[in-house]
Image: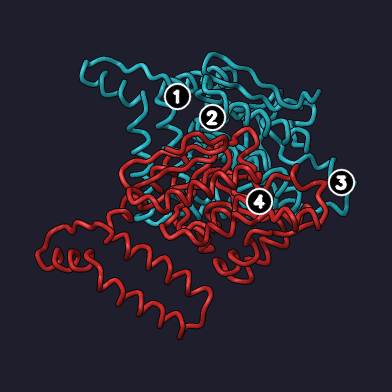
Amino acid sequence: MGNSYKYISVDVDGFVALVELRRHQAHNALNLELMEELVAELERLDVDDDVRCTVLTGSMRAFAAGADISEMVDATAVEMKLRNQFRCWDRIRWLRKPLIAAVNGYALGGGCELAMACDIIVAGENAKFGQPEVNLGVMPGAGGTQRLVRAVGKARAMEILLLGEPITAEEALQFGLINRVVPSELCVQEALGIAQVISSKAPLAVQLIKESVGKAYDSTLQDGMEYERNCFYLLCGSQDKTEGMRAFMEKRQPFFQGR
Amino acid sequence: MDTSIRVEQRDTVAVISLNRPDKLNAFTPEMQRALQDVLTGIERNEEIRAVVLTGEGRAFCAGQDLESIQHHPDLNYGEVLKQGYNPLILKLTRLDKPVIAAINGVAAGAGVSLALACDFRIASERASLIQSFVNIGLIPDSGSTWLLPRIIGLTKAIEVMFLGEKISAVDAAQMGLIHRTCPPEQLLSEALALAERLGKLPTKAIGMTKRAIYQGLGNTLEQSLAYEAQLQALAGRTDDHQEGLRAFFEKRTPEYQGR
């Protein structure tokens, strides 16, 4: 298993992987090395047939408190461009399997963007979400202005981005930024429970649903509908469709194999 | 060194004293900060399983120090509340340990709110409470408009807050505003006895009960049922629950460790 990482740990149980950010003394500030490790591992899990869903979490104090400011404080624009700071972030959106964020404590800046890059977000009651970049004279660079506005709408996104003040888990739930709030001690367990349910579904259907929902962001309704329909037809060619529909008729649990 | 708050640990009980007796323990910003810090320390100290909050001298707490605002005509009261009082009230209601207000003398304005945010209120027969805000043209703050109707009902709460009359400890006990009265010289020992009793209870369960109660005040029945199920899952994993079960079957008194 890929447990030789410096900043993350990985634990696979059944079809579900749990990836934990472990740069705790820095409140899981996302430096380049951590992001490289994380995305490499997520890509590895994405092609592992024995894994169907991944939960990503941090510590009780911080999911991830942001980017690593010390890496950027002296960098010029040209250096930042050459460094291509966010190159591995873009790869997260190409992952085919669902990713669930289990957020306790701070999810700020890059931490909030990382959570938003996941498909489902479960938060502990103590979680705080925010994009405080404006306080440092910059702005989000890994999707903060784009994903947030799609998640919560323009009015709320503007407020969060322009004031730079964090919001509570309860507010994030009301705004539609996250899916569930649970007592912090139960956050990871809740996310793992969701992951288990998802991994009991037909893997190909799960992947194409994720892909189609993603399409809803990037295309016209007509194109998205077309895409959805073709994905639906494609699934009709899968063994899992035959098994799923037969099990339904026979009133028994289906056994899906991802084919 | 700020001396406006004194704290003393007696076994599993922390005794906090508001300590500006010459000013009837009226709040200053320094005193609020000191009280916040003391509560944070108590929150993190696993040894402490119950808290007593009382005042030095003849008053419990006279609320905001009016002298300190008299010479600041531009002071924004909203900010004073947001920065100082509101976090304090939230801290008290969210503290996962029982808090007893030992009301030794007059409690006025925010001093009443402070007592309302505690879980138990015992008062000296000589004490009195006054929702004095209206008498200087202000509205009850620091949680009073939310807490008081929930504690004594809407009818009484409106009377108390509109008329701003002094309420004797005996009358306060009668209307359910406080739990009970006792002779002045016995107040501290009564409060300590109750705290010691509370300090022997399964502290985690008590803390979660408190969470569920406060959360429940804003919840639907469905939400509270779900929240209870989550917290019970946690309570079921505590050492104290195991001890409670063992003691029940062994027909003896349980000895809870607060874990």
Is B191 situated above or below B222? above
Image quadrant in which the N terminus of chain A is located:
top left
**Tag 1: amino acid:** Leu
On the same chain: label 3 and label 2? yes
**Tag 2: amino acid:** Ile
Q: Secondary structure at mark 4?
A: loop
Is A117 situated above or below B40? below
The reply to whether discs 1 and 3 touch (Cβ–Cβ < 8 Å) is: no
Q: Find residue A144 and report its horizontal and vertical position in percent.
A: 64, 61
Chain appearing in cyan on the rendered image:
B
Which labelled disc corresponds to residue B140? 4
Q: Colour of chain A?
A: red
Q: Which chain contains the residue that carries disc 2?
A: B
Q: Residue at x 49, y 44 (%)?
A: A57
Disc nearer the start of the sequence (3/2): 3
Which labelled disc corresponds to residue B198? 1
**Tag 3: amino acid:** Gln
Cα gap from disc 4 to disc 1, whole angstroms: 30 Å
The reply to whether discs 1 and 2 touch (Cβ–Cβ < 8 Å) is: yes
